Image (cartoon, helix red, strand yellow):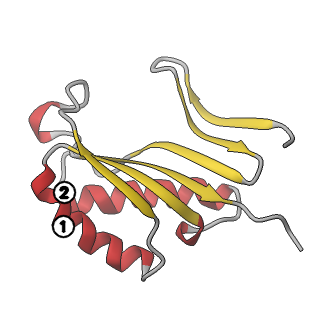
Amino acid sequence: MGEIKRYDVNEENAYSGYVEAGDFIFLSFCVGNVGQSIEQQVEGALDHMSDRLQRANLTLDSIVKVDILLRDVWDIPVMEEVFKRRFKGNFPARKTISTEFAHCGGPNGLKVQIDGVAYKPKPN
């Protein structure tokens, strides 16, 4: 399998932003535009994910699985509209759950976090 590489290591909160292991990249805690609308936060989280993928010469098309944490499950339709725009039919497998995000900015702070798995094919 080769070496496991960890990037954007957050010592304070004990996690890696993303990890390369073999043909896969595991992305955690993709967030953005905290404090703004749910639509803007989903866009920001996908921008954050996309920025990390760019470092591995990948795009959102490489994402095969996402886990979405939402403060309010009633925001799922808004999240799905953003996904339709951003993934353009190349939708990843998905799990969506609700959580309180108690440690991140109070009721007007963090509304969505996206974790993902990307596939990195071997060069031909």
Q: Nearer the viewer, mark 2 or mark 1?
A: 1
Q: Residue, x 20% and y 32% (percent of image)?
A: 105
Classify residue 3 by image quadrant: top right
Amino acid at the residue labelled 1: Val
Task: Say which label, 2 or 1, has the lower sequence index.
Answer: 2
Query: How many numbered marks are there?
Result: 2
Amino acid at the residue labelled 2: Ile
Vertical placement of 86 versus 70: above or below?
below
Residue 16 — which label? Answer: none
The N terminus: image quadrant: top right
For disc 2, the marked residue is: 38
The C terminus: image quadrant: bottom right
Q: Nearer the viewer, residue 86 or 119?
A: 119
Q: Nearer the viewer, residue 42 or 74?
A: 74
Q: Nearer the viewer, residue 6 or 91?
A: 91
For disc 1, the marked residue is: 78
Classify residue 8 by image quadrant: top right
Separation of disc 2 and disc 1 at Cα?
7 Å
Q: Nearer the viewer, residue 1 or 58?
A: 1
Q: Residue, x 44% and y 72% (percent of image)?
A: 91
- Tell me if label 2 and label 1 are in contact, CB under 8 Å: yes
